[in-house]
Structure formats: C-alpha cells, structure tokens
Image (cartoon, rainbow, N blue to C red):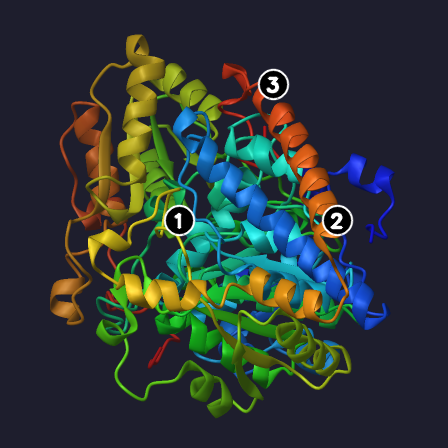
C-alpha cells in the first residue's frame, strides 16, 4: 500500500494542510497519522540536534501531545485563526505553518518566521493564519478572543482556536477571557491541553481538589467538554462540533484534553529521574502514545501496512533534513537590524 | 495648523474637541470602535463620549466588564485582524491592571514577530487631580509608559492638539497611550473644523523667548504658560516648549530651544525620580552642554503619592509661582511673591475652576 499523496507535495515540504473535513474516514485517518508522525519526527530531530548548540533559544517540545494539535487543526478551515503558547511547535505545524521558516527561527536566522526576533517561544505564520504564540501564561488567550471579536465585528465566518495549558487556567485573565467570549457570543474555541504539570509543579500544589477549569468555563455559560487528548480522532470530532457551533454564531466552547508531555518542560532531555513525577506514570502514558494507538488501530483494520509507514518515514525524513539544511545555511540578521522594528510606523 | 486656526475661530473645550475627534473617526472609518468602562454612561467620560453610542450603536461604542487586562488583549487581537480600537480608562491607575497586555503584548508584538504585524490601538487614560482623588485616582504615569519601546505616548495640552492628536493616534499603526489630564477637559481653545492631524513625535513652541526654556506637557504646560506670562510682566522672556509627545521625544526641538536660551527648566506632572524630567535633563546635558549657562532644573511631583486631604495636596503640585521663581533663580534673580506676580487666587487648590462642585 502506498501513500495517496503526491510526491511533489512532499518535495515542496514546507507546509502541510490537513484538508480532511470532506475526506473519507480512511483517508482522513492516514492524514492524521501522517501529520502526527511528521510533527513527532520534527520534534525528535530538534531534540537530537539541540546539542549542536545552534538552536540557541529555549524549546518546549510537543512530543506526546501531537494528537491535540493535529485533531483540532484537522477540524479547522484554512482561514480560521489559531493562537498558542510557549509549547506551540505542533500547533504551528498542524495549522499549516512553514517548516523552513520555523526551523530558521530556532536557528536565529533572518529567514525565520519572526526574523530571529522571537525564537521558539514567539512563532507566527500569517499565511497559515497562525497569528502568534507567546509564552507569558494566559497572555495569548485574550488576544485570541480579540481576533475572534474583530472577525465577528467584520461579519466573517471565521473561528479562532486558542491553545493553552492547565496552568494558564489559573491566571485571572483566563476567567476574564471566558467571560467576554461568552458575553459577546464570540466564535472561539478554547482548547486546554491538560498535561498535569507546570514545569515541575503538579496539579495538586496549584489547584484545590475538585477545582475544574471546565466547570469554570461552564459557569460562564458555555459548553465545556473533557476528552482524551491522545485519541486524535476523538479530538477531531469533538473539536469539529465546537468549531461548527462557533461558526454558526452560537458562541464559544471550552475543550479540555488530557495528555502528557514526554520530555522535560524546556529542552530536549528526559527528566523523569528528577522525581517530580514517577517513571511508572510516564510509562503508563507512553503506552497511550497517540501515534502508536492510531497506528495499531489502522493496521488491525488493514488501512496501513509496513510499506506505508516506511514510505512515510522516508519522505518525512527527507523533508526534515532539507528544512534543517535550509535553516543551518540561512544568513543571520546583521548588526544594522538591531534597532529596526520598534514601530510599524516610525515617526519624525 | 495655524492657518486652520485662523480660519476657524470657534472655541471648544478639550473634552468637546476629543468628542469631535472620536465622532469623526467613527463616522469615517468602520474599523474604529470605542471600548471602556462607562463609555455609554450619562456623563460620557467627562463629556468626551456623549451621544456616541446613540449615534453609532452599542457594537461600535461599547461598555465593558471590569476586566482591564483581558479587554486590552481583546483590543490587541482585534487590531491584529484589522480593527482600530480606542480603549478608555477613566483613570491611569486602572490601566495598571492591564500592564501585561500593554507591555508584554501590545508594545512587543510588532517586534517579536519579525515586523509582520502591527497593533493600531489607542488607549486613553485620564490623570486625576483635585477633590481628594487620592493616591489611586491621580497617578500620572507617562514615565512608566514612555520607558517601553514600541509604545507611543502622547499628552496634548490644548483642545486643538487634543483633537488633532487623537485623529493622528487613531490613524497611527502603533499602540498609542493617550494621556489626558482631568483639569484640561474644561479648558477652552480654538479648534479647527473637520478633520486634521497634529503629527505625533513633534513638540510645539507654546511661547517664544530667549532668556530661558521651560519644557512641559499636559496640565504642567498650562501652569508653565501662566508662569511665563507672569515673568513677562517682570521683564523676562521665557520660551515655553510643549512636548505634546513624550515617546518618541522631539529631541531636536528641545535642543534647539536650549541652545538658544542656555537655560532649561523642566516641569513634569510625574514623580521626581526616574521620570520624564530626568530623561530631558539627560538629553539636554548630552546634546547642548556647551550652551548651558546653568544646570538644568526640574520641577515635578515629590516622590510620594497624592494625599487626599487638601491641606497636604496644596503643597503637592508645582504652581505657576514656583515655576516662575525657579526660572528667576536660574537667572540669578530674587524670587517674587504670588501677589507680585498677580497669581494670587481665591480658588481652592483642589478644584480646576470655580464651577467644580465634586465628587469626581
């Protein structure tokens, strides 16, 4: 069995669009699996090559959490908006962000998506309508609500998805943003990736027993759903319903997906040995690998085989290698560029 | 703009001038909307938004929940996708709740995403004074905001400038912090009809002279003009520079004046230490040192908060008499009394004019 995808598409390799809304289930599953694998390999390559000390910025990898990014973005249309946080690599790529510009940004190059000004923590791709990711906890949530608000004022049928983590729901601005989105019935989908840890701090030291961000959202009068963040198909169908609601003018929805971060909070390494979480807990989540789970299901159903996966891995590897080559050889910004960019409209 | 003023002798208050600017912006640019707590109130933000919601509807002239931080983020997000919001805080003090969105988000967005996007928002903030406003209703934080790259900070002092700079601020593609002093709202001045822009980043010569330069902004500019007029009666011609924009400073205009007069007296409505006046002293010392005939001097608020009791508040703000005497001291002349200047007044220190009856 071979990939249905055109080889030139892959050779172009800079962006992927998850055009799966009208695909048949098998094609859709192949696309979801392919995209999760692609993202996983990008992140693993960043981790492998980080020791080369040429990606000189903090990286917060999405390994283990790919299904949320891919499932949600698969339910979006290209003109919908997305915002994210410090852990945005998967969201950026799944939304259709340019892989070359992304890696060049990690390498601090002028061809980076933020011209080297932002690094991994401030990535953007306007063509993909990935409008920005910022690392101050909770800070991009109201900006996303604002994009939805602007979109609504302009009478567009766009939806805005805002990705954030469990700790962001502790910030006051989270509740303020829920309040406004509900008050104005804005076309927003709030997507919380609950991976239970904020750096080394577990949920238990941050939130009282019984506190549930989904209840906070529901208290503001919007549907609030929890789901398995490692089941990409379930993420996709849950998101699709929320996105449709928003597009139909019925207002915001809060979605919370349980998932798990495999590597350390910031950086390429494994750190379970530090003891803030147990190896057993990690292994139980690793067994629920979103990629292997779907892969197993699809093999059992005869939808993919070894050949399919081998071809996929091979083309993904080629694409990633080419992207890293681009990033490594692209020029740095020059000293003259230091003081440019304060204003969009310089005065005097 | 002088030509415009000569052709249009009608007088408006600063507040009416702002209302006219907002009305014009709403009428001519569908991307513009207003948002603030109490914007559609019967008092219309000290008269500056009166009638606008009736005219343009609640979608474009909006009240808002008590969520300054999130709503500033909402303004930013809406600006990213093409809107031009004007956000209004009835006091500068309330905007402090939104510093993450002003400083971390709005000011930085253009830079940190490689210059691809811009944030054309205007945030109006009102500096309170008088009638026991007290410590949390009277802060004047131009220095705080002017320290932040990526922000533009303006403080017009005349009705004509208020209208022209508001229109320019709305048209500007960057985030503009628009600081209005409460005691300027009732002041009158000639205001041209129709649309015009007063350029941001440009100071103005409010009074010409050659003995000394007073550099001021906002309500301090009015007090400085009173001082300059009093000094003229004593035979001195002081130049008064109205900064109008704090960030970016019009350094060329400041230096040109000080090179001419050799003496710089800076009057600023913020606290003394680490303030706008300090930045001006640095600018002047660096750029006009050889011209200086005496050290630059600053008159500011002391490093403490506005006391509510008028008994203490009367000693808190620089007065025209103090400004005039500081200038005379710099010129090696004896200070004069308030009466000698003709600046004596029965007006209590805590009201802007005799009609004011409180409470805010």
Vertical order, B265 against B353 (above or below): above
Whole-number angstrom distance, CA of label 2 to CA of label 1:
81 Å
Vertical order, A154 against B80 (above or below): below
Q: Residue at x 25, y 41 (%)?
A: B323
Do the residues under discs 2 and 1 have CB atoms within 8 angstroms?
A: no
Locate residue A156 relative to residue B178 in the image: left or right. right
Locate residue B59 relative to residue A287 in the image: left or right. right
Of B334 and B136, nearer the camera is B136
Whole-number angstrom distance, CA of label 1 to CA of label 3:
59 Å
Residue at disc 3, secondary structure: helix
10 Å neighbourhood of mark 1: few (<14), some, or many (≥20)?
A: many
Of the numbered discs in the image, which one, if any, rests on residue A277? none
Q: Earlier in the sequence, mark 3 or mark 2?
A: 2
Of A332 and B286, nearer the camera is A332
10 Å neighbourhood of mark 2: few (<14), some, or many (≥20)?
A: few
Of the numbered discs in the image, which one, if any, rests on residue A329? 3
Could you tell me residue A146's position as x and y percent? Answer: 60, 66
For disc 1, the chain is B
For disc 2, the chain is A
Q: Which is closer to the viewer, label 2 or label 1?
A: 2
Of B143 and A58, nearer the camera is A58
Whole-number angstrom distance, CA of label 3 to CA of label 2:
33 Å
Q: Residue at x 21, y 18 (%)?
A: B294
Of B306 and B71, nearer the camera is B71
Q: Which residue is mark 1?
A: B222
Locate residue A206 relative to residue A159 in the image: left or right. left
Could you tell me residue A14's position as x and y percent? Answer: 73, 39
Residue at disc 1, secondary structure: helix
Could you tell me residue B293's position as x and y percent? Answer: 24, 14
Look at the image and tell me whether residue A150 can be seen.
Answer: no
């Amino acid at each position: 069995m071979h990939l249905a995808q055109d080889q030139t598409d892959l050779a172009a390799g800079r962006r992927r669009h998850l055009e799966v809304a009208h695909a048949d289930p098998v094609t859709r599953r192949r696309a979801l699996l392919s995209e999760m694998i692609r993202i996983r390999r990008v992140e693993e390559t960043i981790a492998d090559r980080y020791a080369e000390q040429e990606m000189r910025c903090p990286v917060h990898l999405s390994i283990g959490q790919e299904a949320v990014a891919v499932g949600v973005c698969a339910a979006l249309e290209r003109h919908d908006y997305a915002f994210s946080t410090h852990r945005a690599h998967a969201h950026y790529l799944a939304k259709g962000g340019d892989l070359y510009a992304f890696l060049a940004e990690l390498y601090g190059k002028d061809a980076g998506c933020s011209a080297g000004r932002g690094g991994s923590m401030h990535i953007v791709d306007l063509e993909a309508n990935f409008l920005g990711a910022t690392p101050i906890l909770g800070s991009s949530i109201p900006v996303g609500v604002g994009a939805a608000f602007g979109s609504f004022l302009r009478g567009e049928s766009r939806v805005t998805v805002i990705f954030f983590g469990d700790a962001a729901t502790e910030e006051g601005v989270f509740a303020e943003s829920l309040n406004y989105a509900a008050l104005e019935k804005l076309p927003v989908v709030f997507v919380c990736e609950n991976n239970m840890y904020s750096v080394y701090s577990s949920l238990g030291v941050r939130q009282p027993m019984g506190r549930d961000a989904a209840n906070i959202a529901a208290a503001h009068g919007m549907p609030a759903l929890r789901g398995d963040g490692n089941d990409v198909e379930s993420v996709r169908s849950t998101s699709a319903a929320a996105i449709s609601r928003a597009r139909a003018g019925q207002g915001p929805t809060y979605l919370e997906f349980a998932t798990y971060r495999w590597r350390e909070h910031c950086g390429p390494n494994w750190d379970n040995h530090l003891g803030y979480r147990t190896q057993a807990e990690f292994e139980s989540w690793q067994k629920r690998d979103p990629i292997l789970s779907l892969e197993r299901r699809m093999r059992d159903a005869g939808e993919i085989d070894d050949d399919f996966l081998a071809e996929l891995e091979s083309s993904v590897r080629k694409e990633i290698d080419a992207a890293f080559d681009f990033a490594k050889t692209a020029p740095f910004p020059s000293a003259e560029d230091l003081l440019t960019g304060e204003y969009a409209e310089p005065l005097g | 703009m002088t030509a415009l003023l000569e052709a249009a002798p009608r007088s408006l208050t600063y507040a009416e001038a702002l209302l006219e600017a907002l009305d014009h912006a709403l009428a001519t640019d569908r991307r513009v909307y207003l948002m603030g707590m109490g914007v559609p109130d019967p008092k219309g933000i000290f008269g500056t938004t009166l009638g606008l919601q009736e005219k343009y509807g609640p979608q474009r002239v909006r009240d808002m929940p008590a969520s300054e931080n999130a709503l500033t983020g909402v303004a930013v997000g809406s600006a990213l996708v093409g809107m031009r919001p004007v956000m209004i805080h009835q006091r500068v003090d309330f905007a402090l709740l939104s510093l993450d969105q002003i400083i971390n988000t709005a000011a930085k967005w253009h830079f940190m995403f490689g210059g691809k996007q811009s944030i054309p928002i205007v945030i109006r903030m009102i500096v309170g004074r008088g009638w026991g406003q007290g410590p949390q209703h009277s802060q004047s934080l131009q220095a705080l905001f002017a320290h932040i790259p990526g922000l533009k900070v303006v403080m017009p002092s005349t009705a004509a400038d208020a209208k022209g700079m508001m229109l320019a601020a709305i048209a500007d593609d960057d985030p503009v912090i628009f600081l209005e002093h409460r005691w300027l709202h009732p002041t009158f001045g000639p205001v041209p009809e129709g649309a015009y822009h007063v350029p941001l980043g440009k100071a103005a010569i409010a009074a010409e002279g050659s003995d000394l330069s007073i550099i001021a902004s906002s309500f301090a500019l009015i007090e400085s003009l009173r001082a300059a007029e009093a000094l003229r009666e004593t035979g001195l011609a002081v130049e008064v520079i109205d900064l109008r924009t704090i960030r970016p400073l019009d350094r060329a205009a400041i230096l040109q004046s000080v090179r001419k007069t050799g003496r710089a007296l800076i009057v600023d409505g913020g606290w003394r230490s680490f303030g706008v006046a300090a930045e001006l002293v640095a600018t002047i010392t660096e750029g006009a040192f050889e011209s200086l005939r005496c050290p630059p001097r600053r008159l500011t608020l002391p490093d403490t908060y506005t006391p509510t009791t008028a008994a203490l508040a009367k000693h808190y703000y620089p007065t025209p008499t103090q400004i005039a005497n500081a200038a005379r001291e710099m010129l090696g002349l004896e200070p004069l009394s308030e009466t000698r200047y003709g600046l004596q007044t029965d007006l209590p220190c805590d009201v802007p004019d005799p009609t004011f009856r409180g409470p805010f």
